[in-house]
Amino acid sequence: MELQPDSSHTPQEKISQFISHVMTAVSSCSLYSEKHPVVAEFAGKMLALADELYAEDSLNFTLVGESFIVNDVPFVEKGLHIANFIKRFRKKKIDKVVFKKAPDLEEMTGFIIGMASREKVASTAHVSVGIVEVRLRGADATPASLLDDGISKVRETLHGVSRFRQLDMIGLEDAVVDFLAVLKKELNVLRIVSPVKSHNEYTYVHATNVSVLSIFQAEVLGFTGEALRDIGLAGLLHDVGKIFVTNTILDKPGKLDAGEWDDMKKHPVYGAMYLAKLSAASPLAAIVAFEHHMKFNGSGYPDTKRIGKKQHIVSQIVAIADFFDALRTERPYRKTLEVPLIAKMLQEGAGKDFNPELVGSFLVSLGEVMGREQ
Ligand SMILES: [Fe+2]
Ligand SMILES: [Fe+2]
């Protein structure tokens, strides 16, 4: 598809438009699938716009700090798509992309799919992608501001989610990258897990805290890289099945009656089914959603004891994080508990409710960070 050159727009406006085409295509890829017609349509639009932007037969995007140099000229426009494009570069550890005259539709679509996927973006004959070896996001940001960034991404994403609307996995993955960066800077995890200030904050603050506490445990156990990110995401999404439970039950100030409790206990199955259908989510997230209320000894729910199903180690990690955060948080029916008391309860549950080795490792590392403060 050819677009006519449009002389009424400045080069900066055309670059903005190019970036917004990339991001629209990337989010369509994540929300629907890479084969969705919108993806090819926007790849076509990108090709047409690139034709107007080539300087000496190439179009270069170089990320420098918080902004781009495009064809050797600083790009000063701001906007949501541009901010998200920069975040994508960071997340994919890309510092430069060069489009050489002229990619075909397949190469452009491949670039979009690469940007949307969890894999490294591969270079092709006409699209060269420069990857930085190690770039820690937000090297100069404070832990508090990184955490705020992460929590607002979780809030925005979980706020819009419903049984009718798919999750924006990009927003959640970016939030996990923020949490990883926070944990690198602030070693005391208890300073990171934030208190719930109001009732309607509970959903996303709890999701955040469980994610952070799961990453904290997993790092100590030696998980790194992509696996650590997947664990953080699984922690964020463990309770996503609650979108299928009515608010009357979720918000009930008192104890649930037997029927309500039965409904509530379905959220792991609902969550697993919802996540299993999401192509952008890792299979681990669905497993953890299904298993986070199972116990180490096979009891708990869903009832899988008779088929002898054992909890995945990441579900065991998330179960400890979930228990810890639930007790640390004040709920309408219960005051918050102090850390030493929760530690004692975890120890009592070790071997029955929780994997004893994971409890041991968690309490030792928690003790270390708390001891360091004194
Ligand atoms: Fe749950
Ligand atoms: Fe939970």
Image (cartoon, helix red, strand yellow):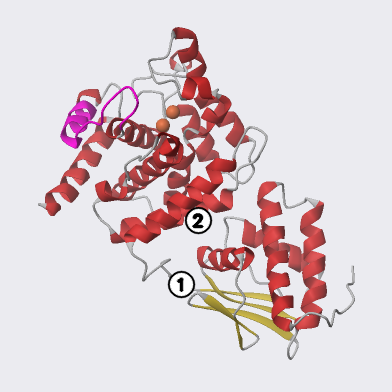
Residue 276 falls left or right of residue 44: left
Q: Which mark is residue 174?
A: 2
Residue drawn 69% across and 73% down?
Answer: 16
Ligand 2 within 8 Å of disc 2? The answer is no
What percent of the width, then of the height, locates residue 243?
56, 30
**Total marks in image:** 2
Which quarter is ligand 1 in? top left
Mark 1 and mark 2 lie on one chain; the one further toward the N terminus is 1
Residue 356 falls left or right of residue 139: left
Corner quadrant of residue 99: bottom right
Q: Is residue 226 visible?
A: no
Q: Nearer the viewer, residue 220 or 195?
A: 195
Q: Which residue is mark 1?
A: 133
Residue drawn 75% across and 67% down?
Answer: 108
Q: Secondary structure at mark 2?
A: helix
Q: Is residue 370 above or below residue 103?
A: above
Instruction: Classify 10 Å Cα crowding around label 1: few (below 14), some (14-19), many (20 and above).
Output: few
Q: Is residue 29 visible?
A: yes
- Magenta residues span 330-347
Residue drawn 46% across and 72% down?
Answer: 133
Q: Nearer the viewer, residue 123 or 6?
A: 6
Corner quadrant of residue 43: bottom right
Q: Nearer the viewer, residue 119 or 270?
A: 270
Does the magenta portion include 210?
Answer: no
Asked if marks 1 and 2 touch (Cβ < 8 Å), the reply is no
Q: Secondary structure at mark 1?
A: loop
What percent of the width, then of the height, locates residue 267?
51, 25
Q: Which mark is residue 347?
A: none
Q: Quadrant of the N terminus?
A: bottom right
Under mark 2, the amino acid is Asp
Q: CA distance from mark 1 to mark 2?
A: 19 Å
